Image (cartoon, helix red, strand yellow):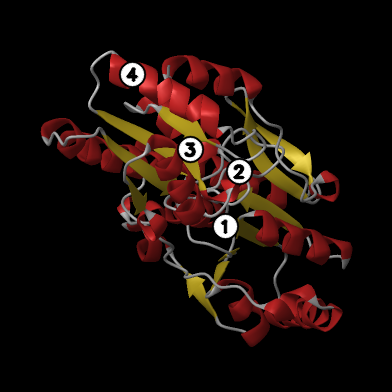
Amino acid sequence: MLTSGGDAPGMNSAVRSIVKTLINKGAEVIGIRCGFIGLLKMKFTKLDVMDVDHISSDGGTFLKTGRTDKFKTEAGINLAVKNIKKMGLDGLIIIGGNGSIMGAKKLAEKGVKVIAVPGTIDNDIAGTDYSIGFDTACNVVISSVDKILDTAYSLVNENPRVFLIEVMGRKSGDIAIHSALSGGVDEFLVPGKELNYKKIISNLEKKFVRGKEHAIIIMAEGVGDSEIIKENLEMELGFKVKRILLGHLQRGGNPTVFDRTLAARFGYQAVQSILNSYGNFMVGIQNSSIELKKIEDIDEKDKEFDHETYELCRVLCR
């Protein structure tokens, strides 16, 4: 097994679940270090129960992760297949985001038995409601928003204090939407929806008239350049806006209970699939049930936009 792409809190819980379940079934477990880089460079080690017994509470990934453009080439894929045969692997479990799952798909096309496990804070993988790491990232955002709210509420200026907080998510707005739902946020900006400054300002000004002396705006990074958006907001408002980039803080930290249990369930199902030779699949969760999606049917298309949650968020930000 390997972890690839961006690290996500909860990956270690998936690794632990996979290792313990496989060993319980009498199988030998090989961990490939540094993602696809390690697969191409044959960086692997045999894993035992005690290697992973303590890792569920740790953020990041015990196996480390990495990307390489070589894996996007035919030569790189062929080398990976050759190394898998050299290591004598019966199958490969890949934990990662969209790029990692596309890599798993290429290996499957070459005859490798592959199971993919969605692990990315962006929660942008079609075919699963949630991916490992998303819940923890949202909790990190909310913790930061709570702290910003403390100072926004406490310190009064001549003009209202407005904070623009940029969160991660690539082209997905899931982190922004779920964080806005959970915190005391006044506006949120997500990809796929019009960036209407007049509506944003109108909403904020109504709040200022009611006596509110601060405002929090969350924006997903996929909306655009936050510095330009900040400047446009300032021009419309007539006073300064503070821009905050949470950045890679969202990737780190101890995984939440939800991410740990989701990862454990994904890992267990991945093992069942690979041992029972169901085929090449991605493990996912839909309507609280763990399901398998044929990896040949998984592509890089955008995950379906959650209009219902978006509309609820619009109401709560008014």
Q: Which mark is residue 26?
A: 1
Q: Earlier in the sequence, mark 4 or mark 1?
A: 1
Q: Nearer the viewer, residue 151 or 247?
A: 151
In the displayed structure, 76 sits above or below 64; it is below
Distance between the alpha carbons at the discs numbered 4 and 1: 62 Å
Judging by the rendered image, the residue that carries numbered circle 2 is 172
Residue 21 in picture, x, y percent from top left: 52, 50
Distance between the alpha carbons at the discs numbered 3 and 1: 43 Å
- Which label lies toward us, 2 or 1? 2
Residue 308 in picture, x, y percent from top left: 61, 18
Amino acid type indicated by mark 1: Gly
Q: Quadrant of residue 303?
A: top right
- Which label lies toward us, 4 or 1? 4
Residue 239 in picture, x, y percent from top left: 32, 41
In the displayed structure, 213 sits above or below 52; it is above
Amino acid type indicated by mark 3: Ala
Distance between the alpha carbons at the discs numbered 3 and 2: 9 Å
Q: Earlier in the sequence, mark 4 or mark 3?
A: 3
Q: Is residue 217 left or right of residue 293?
A: left
